[in-house]
Image (tube, helix red, strand yellow):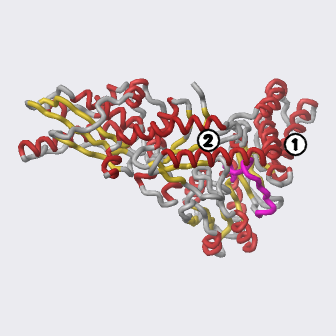
């Protein structure tokens, strides 16, 4: 059976050249980079090179990159590290309602210990209004954290406008760019972000490797204390293989980005147009133009997303679903809810996320397999008949 | 979270999908906010459920529990059908993931609602005391 991976938002396959770069270190890269002997020198030089590539991907300086174990750790480090380091200035943080849980949950914890958080709403496309950010700023505001782009609905936020507002007020701006970094061009100096989280497995690097960009001169408390790795900001012997993989993936992303984006966007629009033509009562989530190239989030009316996911999986097609049933909390996705989708329709959320390995015949295959699945589930649904009349 | 092969079988090949134009009892339970709606229709003859069909809006577990419970109540008397517990439904599917146990509760409620409707139609009086089901308790596990 043909296998099609349409869940790049959850994690991307390793680029063959990334694997190639990692393999020698898997075998011989055991030297602790902190050591001065030849074994340590080999790995520390490789890490330095990786740091340069990761920095280069977002137009940062190498010493502004702190390697972490994941995008989640980078988000935790940014929030729990930067805000307390500036606690004397204030205790107010501004964020949006559609952040990833690795931003929302640390903030919830911080709210229990003297921090105050403003959760900005978004419009129906999932976009934060930069004016809302400006209005929410108080003398106690120390930090703004708004994602670069949504991994769930693909919307790219007005980062540059928010960056201009925070710069003017001297407030630190962190952005969770896990879904964006390596998938769209980012220039941290141009958009004026002070801290940015990313994850290697979102751009064909290995999982277990992430990074936090932190603008030179910004204070941060280390989340992990111990040795002086990562400039004392993240102690612990480096994940040498993961970091090397992330460096190579960043180098390749930078190099291949224009071609990847053009190809992925074309295929994504083909898939969208094909689905809208073949299936009725189906809605596209996210901003119509300002979105990640490979993200296609849909709400399919009268049916539930997990059922679609399972039937597609039986046909070899892997997607993800934002329905209540696939999340442990049994609540519809907070992102889909925040953009104003009604409760029943939100249950029918399915996310197709394309990547550099997606091919044209994959799209044709999905367009052949999806409509009968939707039809079958609708025939089974008590909501379908009642609304069809 | 993974489903048992039996759950996947009932999900992929659901038994008794549909409804009767001349149903003797129909019960609809659940709500879209929770992610599932189950509609159970029964045909009753001499106090025995001779046929059952379902329509379900929901996840894999919701469809599988609907499917197997229609099979389990067929041939049972009204009293026997009411004794069917959500646990028995889950066990018949070789278990459900903990987060999906509420689907089996929904199946039990759907059967009860269909029987209640049947009794109202035939005797003018529904079930005397509705069973207290720990529906909400299963949420968020």
Q: Which of label 1 and label 2 is nearer to you?
A: 2
Q: Residue A46: give x, y in percent of width and height.
A: 87, 37
Relative to A248, does residue A337 appear above or below in the rendering? below
Q: Main secondary structure of the magenta part?
A: loop
Q: Is residue A141 visible?
A: yes
Q: Is A275 on the left-hand or right-hand side of A25? A: left
Residue in front for this viewpoint, B46 or B134: B46
* Tags 1 and 2 on a common chain: yes
* Disc on res. A10: 2
The numbered mark 2 sits on a residue in which chain?
Answer: A
Task: Give the residues drawn in magenta, as a range.
Answer: A177-191
Relative to A56, does residue B93 appear above or below in the rendering? above
Q: Which residue is drawn at 83% across and 59% down?
A: A216
The numbered mark 1 sits on a residue in which chain?
Answer: A
Q: Residue at x 32, y 25 (%)?
A: B92
* Residue at image mark 1: A48
* Disc on res. A370: none
Q: Is residue A228 visible?
A: no
Helix, strand or loop at label 2? It is: loop
Q: Does the magenta stretch include residue A212?
A: no
């Amino acid at each position: 059976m043909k296998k099609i991976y349409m869940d790049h938002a959850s994690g991307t396959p390793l680029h063959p050249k990334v694997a190639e770069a990692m393999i020698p270190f898997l075998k011989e890269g055991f030297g602790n980079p902190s050591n001065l002997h030849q074994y340590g020198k080999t790995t520390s030089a490789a890490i330095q090179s990786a740091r340069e590539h990761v920095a280069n991907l977002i137009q940062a300086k190498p010493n502004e990159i702190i390697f972490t174990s994941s995008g989640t750790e980078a988000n935790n480090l940014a929030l729990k590290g930067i805000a307390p380091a500036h606690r004397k200035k204030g205790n107010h943080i501004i964020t949006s309602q559609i952040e990833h849980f690795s931003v929302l949950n640390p903030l919830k914890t911080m709210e229990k210990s003297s921090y105050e958080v403003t959760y900005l709403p978004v419009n129906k496309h999932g976009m934060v209004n930069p004016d809302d950010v400006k209005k929410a700023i108080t003398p106690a505001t120390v930090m703004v954290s708004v994602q670069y782009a949504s991994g769930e609905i693909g919307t790219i936020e007005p980062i540059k406008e928010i960056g201009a507002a925070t710069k003017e007020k001297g407030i630190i701006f962190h952005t969770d760019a896990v879904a964006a970094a390596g998938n769209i061009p980012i220039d941290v100096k141009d958009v004026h972000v002070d801290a940015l989280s990313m994850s290697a497995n979102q751009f064909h690097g290995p999982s277990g490797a992430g990074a936090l960009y932190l603008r030179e001169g910004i204070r941060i408390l280390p989340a992990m204390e111990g040795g002086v790795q990562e400039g004392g900001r993240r102690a612990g012997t480096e994940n040498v293989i993961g970091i090397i993989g992330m460096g190579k993936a960043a180098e390749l992303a930078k190099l291949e980005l224009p071609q990847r984006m053009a190809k992925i966007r074309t295929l994504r629009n083909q898939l969208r147009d094909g689905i809208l033509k073949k299936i009725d009562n189906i809605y596209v989530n996210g901003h119509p133009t300002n979105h990640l190239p490979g993200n296609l989030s849909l709400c399919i009316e009268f049916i539930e997303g997990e059922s679609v996911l399972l039937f597609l999986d039986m046909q070899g097609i892997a997607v993800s679903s934002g329905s209540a049933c696939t999340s442990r909390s049994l609540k519809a996705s907070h992102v889909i809810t925040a953009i104003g989708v009604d409760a029943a329709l939100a249950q029918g959320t399915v996310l197709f996320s394309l990547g550099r390995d997606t091919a044209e015949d994959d799209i044709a295959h999905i367009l052949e397999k999806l409509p009968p699945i939707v039809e079958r589930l609708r025939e089974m649904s008590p909501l379908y008949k009642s609304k069809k009349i | 979270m993974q489903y048992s092969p039996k759950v996947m079988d009932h999900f992929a090949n659901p038994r008794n999908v549909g409804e009767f134009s001349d149903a003797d009892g129909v019960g609809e339970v659940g709500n879209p906010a929770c992610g599932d709606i189950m509609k159970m229709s029964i045909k009753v003859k001499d106090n025995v459920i001779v046929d059952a069909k379902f329509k379900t809006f929901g996840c894999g577990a919701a469809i599988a529990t609907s499917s197997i419970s229609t099979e389990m109540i067929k041939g049972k008397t009204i009293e026997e059908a009411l004794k069917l517990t959500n646990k028995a439904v889950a066990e018949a599917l070789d278990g459900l993931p903990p987060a999906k146990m509420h689907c089996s509760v929904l199946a039990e409620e759907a059967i009860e609602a269909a029987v209640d409707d049947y009794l109202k139609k035939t005797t003018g009086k529904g079930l005397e005391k509705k069973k207290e089901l720990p529906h909400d308790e299963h949420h968020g596990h």
